Amino acid sequence: MSGCKSFRGTKEKDMIDINGEKADINLSFKNNLREQIISYSVLKNYLKDKNIILNGVKLKYLSKLFGNLKCVIFTPEDLELSKGSPDKRRSYIDLCISQIKPGYFSVINKYDSLLMQRNNLLKKINMGISQADELEVWDEQLARMGSYITLLRYSYIKKLNVFSRKLYDEISMNKEILELSYNSTVFKKIEGRTDYKGEMAEEYLSLMKKNLKDDLKFGFSQIGIHRDDLITKLNNLSSRDFGSQGQQRSIALILKLAQAYILLEETDDAPVILLDDVLSELDENRQKFILSSIKEMQVIITSCTDLDSNKNIKHKGKNFIVSGGEVSQKK
């Protein structure tokens, strides 16, 4: 409903009951402007023909819902965000930006499509099927689009660094300093630059041409925004290389909390916080920290245990029990 695919899996058929033929979701929500209604349905035999309706208007793509219902989700898998592979951090940053700039999602998809076509062409050139000068049309588009994406990522990470540093001061009781930065495989300097159609694109294109020999050798594009990374440091040391498991988890939590605060600041809407069985993975201090940090937002928590038995969770909300595929409210 927020414009994303399910974090459980990316296939629409997984949203349909094993013995069913159709999945329906209907949701109403209020933001700072008005109440809105979203409905989504998909048939098992017609998965590509999804029926997505926002306030009575049919949408062609799920991503068109971006920017309406804002959610931030925590899962146990997110605790690997700090020490996991770079593609996880790139996806995280791209999702964060898309929540603020809905059109950004289509830019990323377009870049990925161009990159795939360029890589296919590199392989054909290696096989003698195509000529190297055919790369020019793809390279020019990738250079402009890659420069634009770089600027948006860099700008977002700067803001993320401000919020994350302050939050980490609290969770570490001022004992450690967290610093975030954007590692670009293309640009040595990004600060103060804006001309993604001109000077930056030319620099990007020049480096792609310089690296062409290696690209042809390996059969894929070795530099570009698809190889960039979000770097996290604690006390000026790489947290990925030197951070303890506890520090890694704290950083992952801080990144998600900072995402929520930035959403609130940029859109004037507090996001819905979804905690999917994540509290059981955290020690008591981290549980208290995360719950106190999101107390002004709407929170939905799933847990394998009775929430009333957890002394850290004090709430005035509703309890629901899910058993055998049935949902019932706990009295």
Image (cartoon, rainbow, N blue to C red):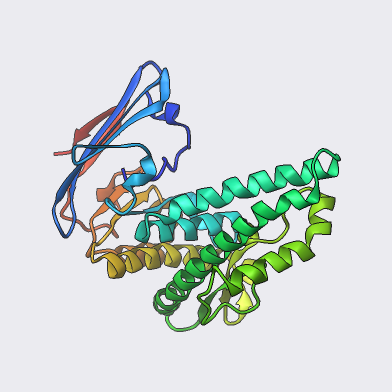
Q: 295 or 314, which is in the foreground?
A: 295
One can see residue 26 in this view: yes
Which quarter of the figure has residue 174?
bottom left
**Residue 49 horizontal side relative to residue 52, left or right:** right
**Residue 29 horizontal side relative to residue 60, left or right:** left
Q: 7 or 200, which is in the foreground?
A: 200
Image position of 164 with respect to 219: above or below: below
Task: Provide residue 266's location: percent of width, then percent of height.
Answer: 30, 68
Image position of 251 with respect to 79: above or below: below
Q: 304 or 72, which is in the foreground?
A: 72
Task: Classify the position of the N terminus by image quarter.
Answer: top left
Which quarter of the figure has residue 164?
bottom left
One can see residue 239 in this view: no
Count the marks. Answer: 0
Task: Provide residue 70's location: percent of width, then percent of height.
Answer: 30, 54
Task: Provide residue 181's location: percent of width, then percent of height.
Answer: 55, 74
Image position of 216 with respect to 11: above or below: below
Task: Classify the position of the C terminus by image quarter.
Answer: top left
Task: Provide residue 118's location: percent of width, then percent of height.
Answer: 69, 48
Residue at coordinates 50% horizontally, 63% vertically from top-left? 249
Residue at coordinates 36% horizontally, 57% vertically from top-left? 99
Residue at coordinates 72% horizontally, 62% vertically from top-left? 208
Image position of 306 with respect to 201: above or below: above
**Residue 318 horizontal side relative to residue 263, left or right:** left
**Residue 280 horizontal side relative to residue 77, left or right:** left
Q: 331 or 31, which is in the foreground?
A: 31
